[in-house]
Amino acid sequence: MRALCESCSRPQPVDWRPGDLCAWCGQAARREVRCFWCAKWTPAAKFCRTCGAAVVEPELYGAARMLKDAGTDRFSVPRQLREFDAEQIENFTRIYQEHAVVAAHHVAQTAFLEQYLEQRHWSAALDDTLAAELPWSIERFEKMRSAARRVPEHLEGLDRARAIGESTPFRETWALATLARLALEDWTACNEAAQCLVTTDETILWEAALALSHWRVLRGPGSPADRRQLLDALRRCPLKEPAALRLALLGEPGGGPLPPEDFGAALVTGDVARLSTAAHEGDPLMQFAAAQRLIELDAAAPAAGVLRSATPDRQLALLRLLERRKRPVPELKEALFEVAANAQERQVVDGACTVLCVGCDAGDALPIARAGRGDPAVYQALLQRAAMPAPVLEQFGEFLIAEGAFRASQWGMKDVAREGRMPAGFVARHWQNAGIETRVELCRFAEMQLGEYGDEELHRFLGMAALTPSDVKVQSEAWSCLYRWYDSFGFPRRRPLAISPAAIQFFFGSPGRFLAGFERFLEGREILRESLQRDRIANLLGDPDSAALPWFVELPAETLAVAGALAGVMRDGEIDLMIRLACADLLGFLGSAAAFRGPVTVLLRTFQGTDMDLQSSRALERISQAAG
């Protein structure tokens, strides 16, 4: 039995009593009962208004349905009910009630799902459908009872919705369970919910469209539904306010007035006050959605708490949104540093540091670098986005060297090497405390700076690094960087590093320092065995400037020490022949001075009968010609 309003046709609450007015509109309500024959609701009068069958008392309804199922015609049922004894009526009623209880379970399951949906008519419709079916055949009864039992009564919320969806024999209830799961933030139901858009039941189509375009879905996993299909369903949906809100959330305004109390309306209108409150007081997804919208509105301050407490994937989404906007957010600086310090996920750390780099204060550069925990992506962001003045750039370079992370190939280093940015003396000042790998990178960075503005002090430093014995990898890199820079001048090529008065003065300052340094260079045999630098070293040794010879004559002891070092190189069979031949040529050059003729001649003659015999003979001929 139920009560139905005669004005608005809405059913009354279960505690309605005869004489009560409609709970919805205040008009008169009437008592209704189901017709035993057609199972339609009809006023509690003598005959059904649908099929004309006599109306029986509610306590006889089950027995009447059993008689109908047995084949009794509609007009004989009331008479037979009067003729049966009480035990037979009770037996019929008991059998029917077993079926009715199972049907009520399925109706209650649908009613449970409706609390998460916009429309709530399906449980009543299922009740009407099942009422017309009862009693079932034995086979269908067992199937329906088994399905009902697979949903434990103790389950609530999402667990219950899942269990209903997995067990229900009704396609419509499965669809409603899927949409309820979506409303309960079970994002695994997204694709199944999208399938509900392909249906002939428009009420389910509309409900699916509303569910898939809810702000929780759009700001959560995102809707998997086809946009055109979604918009079409929303435009045809009879629930105007919810549909208008969903259209606005999808960027299609003009669908009608928005429900003012819905949080989605605040997202659409950009109500900063309400969004700020939601960012502090809402559930996690509401906080996240509010934070996103506040960032979009350039009112990010209330998003600080969300940024600190959100899950890593949501933190990353907020950080990427901030990064895309490419605007400084000083109001979030403290929160961003906390996120970078506390996050376990590398992407979150990088994202927080990258956002901090945009328009950061000079004093924040090193704290950001430390917060990056050694990630080159953070260093790249600092180099490319943070406008660091020269002193701060040098401090940052010092930090990278200390961390073993200085790389000339790091994105952004090309900009840092430009004139006016990293000081030209940076490489020289930090060379002594740098390790081998870092010195290699410093050579490469020095080459970049030279390529930008050719600083003389840096040129001198790199030339001395090439001539000063050290780790062969570092010394060889210095040669390569220096000569790549020389080669960049084009033709005719200029080689400032040479045995000439100008080069000696530029690199060493005096002939004495040159001769002492050059002797050490020749005794540092590792670089002479480096095949990569063979041609460069051979050219240096084999093409001295005659103008330098008078300087050497003034320093006979130092020059003869160099001559001895040259002879030592000639005797080393592990050194490439081209360099050894160049050493013989340089000895011939020195011997052409009368002051050195005797000692050099003696040295050259020691190579008779060796692989240096021919080149030594040529050097001796040169000396003879000079003496002639």
Image: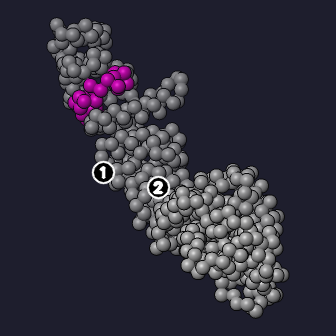
Q: Residue furthest bottom?
A: 19
* Location of residue 285 with respect to 481 vertically, above or below: below
Residue 520 drawn in magenta: yes
Give left or right: position of 247 versus 582. right
Along the viewing direction, whichever of 344 and 45 lies nearer the viewer: 45
Q: Residue 134's image quarter?
A: bottom right
The type of residue carrying mark 1 is Asn
Q: Earlier in the sequence, mark 1 or mark 2?
A: 2
Name the residue: 54% across, 60% down: 138
Please name which of the two marks, 1 or 2, marks the residue nearer to the observer: 2
Residue 277 percent coordinates (x, y): 61, 79
SS of the residue under disc 1: loop
Residue 259 percent coordinates (x, y): 74, 74
What residue did someone put label 2 on? 347
Residue 156 percent coordinates (x, y): 50, 72
Count of number-bearing discs: 2
User: Does the image show residue 374?
Assistant: yes
Q: CA distance from mark 1 to mark 2?
A: 32 Å
Few, some or many C-alpha atoms within 10 Å of disc 2 (few <14, some 14-19, many ≥20)?
some
Name the residue: 23% across, 28% down: 525
**Residue stretch rendered in magenta on the structure:** 514-538
Q: Are marks 1 and 2 in contact (CB under 8 Å)?
A: no
- Quadrant location, the N terminus: bottom right
The type of residue carrying mark 2 is Gln
Name the residue: 28% across, 9% down: 618
What residue did someone put label 1 on? 433
SS of the residue under disc 2: helix
Give left or right: position of 278 versus 438. right
* Location of residue 51 with respect to 388 vertically, above or below: below
Along the viewing direction, whichever of 64 and 533 lies nearer the viewer: 64
- Quadrant location, the C terminus: top left
